[in-house]
Amino acid sequence: MPDSVVVTDESGVRVIRMNRPEKKNALTQPMYAAMAAALREADGHATIRCVMFAGSPGAFCAGNDIGDFQHQADSGLAPDTMDFLHALVRNRKPLVAAVNGIAVGIGTTLLLHCDYVVAGSGAVFTTPFTRLGLLPEAASSLLAPLRMGHARAFALLIMGHSLSAEEAKAAGIVNAVVDPAAAEPTALKAAHEIAALPPGAVALSRRLMRGDLDAVAARVDTEAMHFKERLASDEARAAFAAFFARKK
Ligand code: COA
């Protein structure tokens, strides 16, 4: 079995690649754990100056594994998910992402923690939280309205309206839209550009730009508290069952 998360380091840039293409990179607990470890380790390595998230052709990430959600119905978001979310908030290295294809749920909300995002022209960003009986996570209930304004954040997070790559750019989630084949090379180029800058100046500037991280971390926890109730709700259980019944 190939690793579901592949971490590679090259010339000061760490690439964290979600690698479960047969399930469109839906995230499992081992994947969250591997990504949290890769972020924390990068934080501790002076030689790693930038971290880039990448996925597979056609699938950046299909969100949390819905089968895992069903298993978490009685316990709430699992520890590895929470650990990843907090690693994402507290991470001090600049974060770049290369998005091709679908970016669902956490596949979109993690981008709110990134500093430079390149999307392939066919990328689609969607957060179907309420349709699943759930609520926004990863502090997106705080960060998305700040980033794109309440009106656009409501359509995305609550109504589940998708954003095209160009719309995501207009909403301030994406820096550049390029041909799908160019998404990773373009993001990697930006990552190397960031890695070549004086790291102390970058770290301090980024820290100031990211604002009140305690408030962001607190929002992650508040959302998770409500997530626990929502995962156990009849609405969520019915939506998860409907997802797995859709091909029958
Ligand atoms: N959890 C578990 N399995 C998932 C998944 C998820 N979030 N997303 C995709 N998969 C699985 C599918 O069940 C399917 O598995 P199978 O081949 O064993 O049947 C496989 O990945 C391929 O997905 P499929 O639905 O056939 O691909 P598609 O291109 O038609 O659609 C999506 C892709 C992402 C639009 C669709 O799979 C989807 O809506 N997934 C759920 C996304 C979601 O709601 N995530 C949670 C957000 S909070």
Image: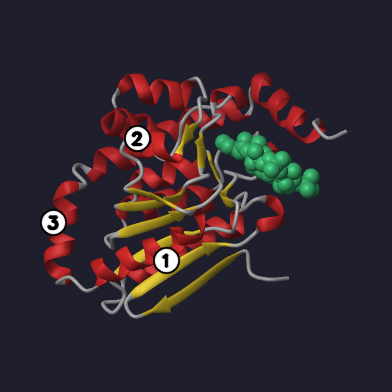
* Mark 1 or mark 3: whose residue is earlier in sequence: 1
Find residue 189 and report its horizontal and vertical position in percent: 33, 67
Residue 26's place in the image compared with 10, above or below, is above
Q: Secondary structure at mark 2?
A: helix
Find residue 27 and report its horizontal and vertical position in percent: 59, 51
Q: Amino acid at mark 1?
A: Pro
Residue 108 lies left or right of residue 62; in this view the side is left
Res. 3 visible in picture: yes
Q: CA distance from mark 1 to mark 3?
A: 25 Å
Q: Quadrant of ligand 1?
A: top right
Q: Residues within 10 Å of mark 3 (few under 14, many from 20)?
A: few
Q: Residue at x 36, y 23 (%)?
A: 152
Quarter placement of the C terminus: top right
Q: Which residue is the site of mark 2?
A: 219
Q: Secondary structure at mark 1?
A: helix
Residue 185 or residue 233, whichever sits in front:
185
Q: How is the image coloured?
A: secondary structure
Find residue 86 and report its horizontal and vertical position in percent: 38, 50
Q: Which residue is the site of mark 1?
A: 185
Find residue 47 and report its horizontal and vertical position in percent: 28, 79
